[in-house]
Image (spheres, rainbow, N blue to C red):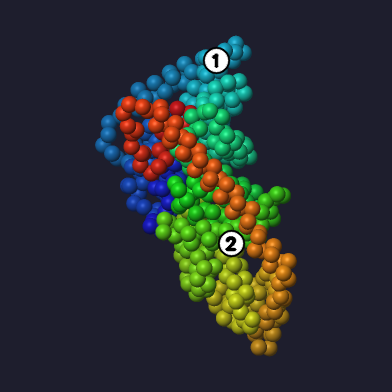
Amino acid sequence: MAEYDLTQKLIPHLDRHLAIPLLNHLSDIAIFPAEQLAKAQYDLVKGTNMVDYVEQLHEQAKTGESRDFAKLREEATAKYQELQEKAQPVMKIDIDQINALYHFGQYQYTLGAYAPAANFLYHFLIFSPSLDLNISAHWGKLSSNILSGEWEAALVEIKDLRDAIDNPHGTSMAKPLAQLQARTWLLHWSLFVFFNLGEGQGCQGLLDMFLSPAYLNTIQTSCPHLLRYLVAAAIISRRAPRPAGTRGNRDHVKELTKIVQMEEYQYSDPVTGFLKDLFVDFDLNQAQKRLTVAESVVRSDFFLSGFADEFVENARWLISEVFCRIHRRIDIGELSKTLNLTNEEGEKWIVNLIRDSRMGVEAKIDLKENMLHITRPHATPTATLIETTRGLAFRSQAIQFAMQSSAGDSRGERGERGERGGRGGRGGRTRGGAPAREEVAA
């Protein structure tokens, strides 16, 4: 499963503290050499102030590097006490003391004290008038909420950051490239939150955010590997109760099939390939084979491993629905074999499928011949019109966003040319489009 692991693609867009659980997960499932992972874990945390943890990993990695951990521990303790003293007199409000809350919260974070860090950054955000510093504090509070397991608070931070990114109001994120980088980070960080909120609220929230025009454009431009999580969320949540105000799962699957087909040249894996096999090629045998590999990929993935059973169950449901849509008479034994079920399990599966699905078909089971007979009512002109125009609003929003982005880029380029005048040229692009954040709130 190492060839399908996305950790190396995800880490450049995460803070180093958020990357620690991913490497710990890889260590647990042992798909990479233990020595290689130990060194990677040490390299990741040696820039933090978690001295005891760094010392433990230093011993495991056996790098031969000599470090005075007693001195590092004394320096970290002294810095902690210094910032703590500066942050205490909060009632004497002035800018320097407000900023002391920010710096102390940031330092708490580097020590691994995530809950206190979130608390200090929360109070800083109440008092601070600095827009750019507030955005940095929101990133720090989001990461602290994630690492302390405060998922509802983290969801609020995602909404706040999304609003700040989409409406920059003259901050450092007003430039298109900065917006692209910030959206790329937010997409990656939000995976921790959405997949810990469950298949209903979490997966539906992920679909709504990731499929919005601005963020879908970011995925296609900067991080197409996130299509795995989009497809998985659509499949996992397909039969989950939907929160009020969210769109139907069937629309998500149809939209994603087109997106996966369009982006195949950039990214493809067994999870996205399953959707293409099923809804583009209509190759049920290949889809079933692909599902076997996709199940292994999902069980090994840090974010998806807890939803493996739901993924397989709903993927089989999709195969069954497609099977019923393209056949009028179905051999129950053949369908059971396609789904890797016994004849008896296949009969129960089909009964539940017809009862619970919204395929718009009528079905009768002939137990004597072990056959399923499908009849389809003719679609009315009104239903055909509704189905044809269902995605029109979404496509119109996407076109409008593309036009606005294009106009904004043109104005930005003209402004930059005017400002640069005779000064030197711009620097090169950072590798990967969006640079990694060395520390939150730095």
In the rendered image, is residue 112 in sight? no
Helix, strand or loop at mark 1: helix
Residue 68 lies, with reference to residue 156, above or below; the image says above
Front in this rendered view, residue 125 or 80: 125
Q: Residue furthest bottom?
A: 368
Q: Mark 2 and mark 1: span between their CA atoms? A: 52 Å
Q: Can the viewer see residue 267? A: yes
Say which residue label 2 marks: 254
Residue located 35% across and 42% down the image:
431
Query: Is residue 93 toward the left or the right of residue 376 in the image?
Result: left
Of 249 and 38, nearer the camera is 249
Residue 221 image position (x, y, % from top left): 45, 48
Q: Amino acid at mark 2?
A: Lys
Question: In the rendering, at what x and y percent does residue 233 appear?
Answer: 57, 55
Q: Count the marks: how many?
A: 2
- As displayed, is residue 360 above or below residue 331? above
**Viewer-proximal residue, 123 or 264?**
264
The residue type indicated by label 1 comes to: Ile
Vertical arrangement, residue 385 with respect to residue 330, above or below:
above
Quadrant location of the C terminus in the rendered image: top left
Count neighbours of disc 1 (C-alpha within 10 A) and say few if under 14, some if 14 to 19, many if 20 or more: few
Q: Is residue 373 left or right of residue 29?
A: right
Residue 87 % position (x, y): 54, 17
Along the line of sight, which residue is nearer the eye, 142 or 263? 263
372 vs 105, left or right, is right
The image quarter in which residue 52 lies: top left
Q: Which residue is mark 1?
A: 95
Q: Residue at x 49, y 55 (%)?
A: 228
Q: Is 439 placed above or below 395 here? A: above
Please give the name of the residue rendered at 66% of the width and 59% of the height, measured from the top-left corner.
390
